[in-house]
Image: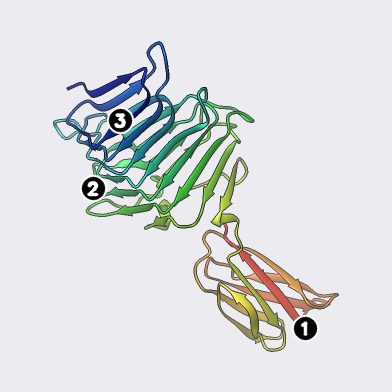
Amino acid sequence: MTTGIRCVDINACEFDSVYLGYNYQGLTAQIGTTTYPNALVFRNLYLMSNYQYGAVINSGVTVTFDGGSVEGNGVDASGAVQPGAAGIAFSNNGVNGSASLRVLGTYFEGNSGSADVYITHNAIGTYVFQGNTFNRIDSTKFVSNNVVIDMSALGAGSAPCKVEWSGNGFWRGGSYAVDPSRRYVAYLMGASFDQLYIDDDGTNNYQDAAEVPSIHPVRAAQYGAFSQLQAQAYVVGASGTMTSNRGISSISRVSAGVYNVVFARPLGGTPMISVALGNGQMSWSYSNLTANSVTINTFSANVPTDPLSFQLLAFPGV
């Protein structure tokens, strides 16, 4: 079939345990003359082996996908990957409200084309991803990104886009090979869009560091685990003994004014380090900085010297 289910002018509807497979599009929802797709809930929806899209929601608001599975979409009958295909394609409207899309506990695997979920952000909106599985398992049939949020048509200062992440798993298997050009999540911001806000509570699992999302350091704002203190310690200068410590595996005094710090777990990216020295007229620097460790150097009149004490704070980088 061309379309499994076509929804026009639907306001407030729930679909339960529906299977849609082997169509060009499994499901579509759009405005006709009356209403945008509004307050729609899809529970345990199974979108399987549709040629181009599992589901297409045009100009939706307050749409929820809860459970179910989205697998094997984006390949035609001959096995050819369809350009631009997606498991779920969604665009928002910003007219009926600003809570746009939630994807909860849904299983994505073996889709091909652009993305498991492709979002076109047209107006102010929020997007929530919680407890989903995203798997790429084949060397030729895969999505370029698991999730795409496309804001590229918008300019600076317009239509804030807010994204919340919690407890999702991004994984590869089978013959799929890691490629840093295919990030798990792609934020397409165009030339000037600067209203992206990301709240990541730190509970996503990313199998491969090379495919972790890349986030613009200036035009995107990050909250959640990224902005939280990850490691801290109060250190006695003469011995390197630490107290009030959290997130630090060890600190060793190598020599006067030189301390090797090992974090209890990788902080991600290039960590941000702050040191407060316990006595005045001294300075400090860092060296050998990685996601796992850092060397703190302390000086008096440019001579390596132990401070009475120092406080160390470390935040994750990008």
Q: Position of residue 257 (x, y in %)?
A: 71, 81
* Mark 2 or 3, nearer chain start: 3
The answer to which of 236 and 175 lies nearer the viewer is 236
* Mark 3 or 1, nearer chain start: 3
Q: Position of residue 209 (x, y in %)?
A: 42, 57
Q: Which residue is mark 1?
A: 308
The colour scheme is rainbow
Q: CA distance from mark 2 to mark 1?
A: 58 Å
Q: Which residue is mark 3?
A: 55
The count of marks equals 3
Q: Position of residue 39 (x, y in %)?
A: 41, 29
Outermost residue, bottom direction? 239
Name the image quarter holding residue 218: top right
Q: CA distance from mark 3 to mark 1?
A: 63 Å
Outermost residue, right direction? 281
Q: Which quadrant of the figure contains the N terminus?
A: top left
Q: CA distance from mark 2 to mark 3?
A: 22 Å
Please identify, in this view, whether the residue under mark 2 or under mark 1 is nearer the observer.
Answer: 1
